[in-house]
Amino acid sequence: DDSHRNFQVSAKAHSSIVADVHIEIDTWIVHNHIDSHPSDKNAIQIILDRDRSQPVKKRQKHTTTVKEAQQIVEALKSFDRNDITSAKNICLDLLGGNDLNHDALDLLGLVELSEENYSDGYKHLKEAWEIRKKTFGSNHLKVAESSIHMADLYRIKNPSESEKLYNVALNIKEKIQGTDHVDNIVILKRLSDLYQSEEKYSSAETVLKRSLYILEKKDGAENLEMANLSY
């Protein structure tokens, strides 16, 4: 029965544009999330704030410096414009000075995946995830970010683990940023895609409706130029 296939949600509102792109391959589904960049100054401050928000008793001997944050921002910008070599070199340079730099490890994992080096990509993403959990504790936005990346990797090989990790990330973000924060839409969209691939169409519809609710609450129904849920 194909009557409930092809759930789709799209929204164009007066807000930051978010593109959620996934590439399907034989073994993995690799997601790349790109949204409109904040200014370099704000992006650097976000990295520093998130690193320094860890409990003092759990803090590493080395915390992110301003220079390292600037390098991470440059690496992210290079990756977004598909300059893979520059992004990779920056990450490797950062890791040469501090092999616990979880931001560099996480981005290096995504870079390796983009080059179809799946074993290395998995290794770097998992290492970044473990460092973040040990450093920040279980309820931190950095842990949520890593949980999403790991969930993306598990989507084909272990869908139940993927669903679990998406929900872990969603719970963290809801605790810290609120249940109606627009960032939650990224995870909800991934969950809906996962549910559709498993033919759990009712669950897919439920999470897509949650996404629409968040958009409408954020921008107001009258400001949504387009919101479409079809199946």
Image (tube, grey):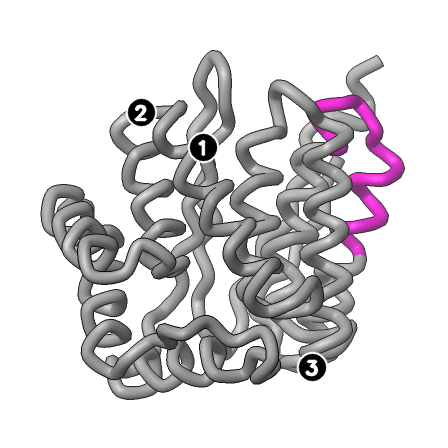
Mark 3 or mark 2, earlier in chain = 2
- Image x and y of residue 230, in percent: 72, 41
x 27%, y 75%: residue: 69
Answer whether residue 205 is magenta in the image. Answer: yes
x 36%, y 69%: residue: 36
Question: 171 or 226, which is in the foreground?
Answer: 171
3, above or below 192, in the image: above
Calculate the distance from the C-alpha at mark 2 to the C-alpha at mark 1.
Answer: 9 Å
x 81%, y 27%: residue: 4
Q: Residues within 10 Å of mark 1 (few under 14, many from 20)?
A: many
Q: Which residues are magenta?
A: 195-209
Q: Residue 93, located in which quarter of the rendered image?
A: bottom left
Q: Residues within 10 Å of mark 3 (few under 14, many from 20)?
A: few
Q: Which residue is mark 2?
A: 117
Q: Quadrant of the N terminus?
A: top right
Question: 46 or 93, which is in the foreground?
Answer: 93
Secondary structure, mark 1, is: helix
In the rendered structure, find residue 75 and report the number of the disc placed on it.
none
Q: Which residue is mark 1?
A: 122
Mark 2 or mark 1, earlier in chain = 2
- Image x and y of residue 90, in percent: 16, 56
Question: 36 or 50, which is in the foreground?
Answer: 50
- Image x and y of residue 54, in percent: 56, 78
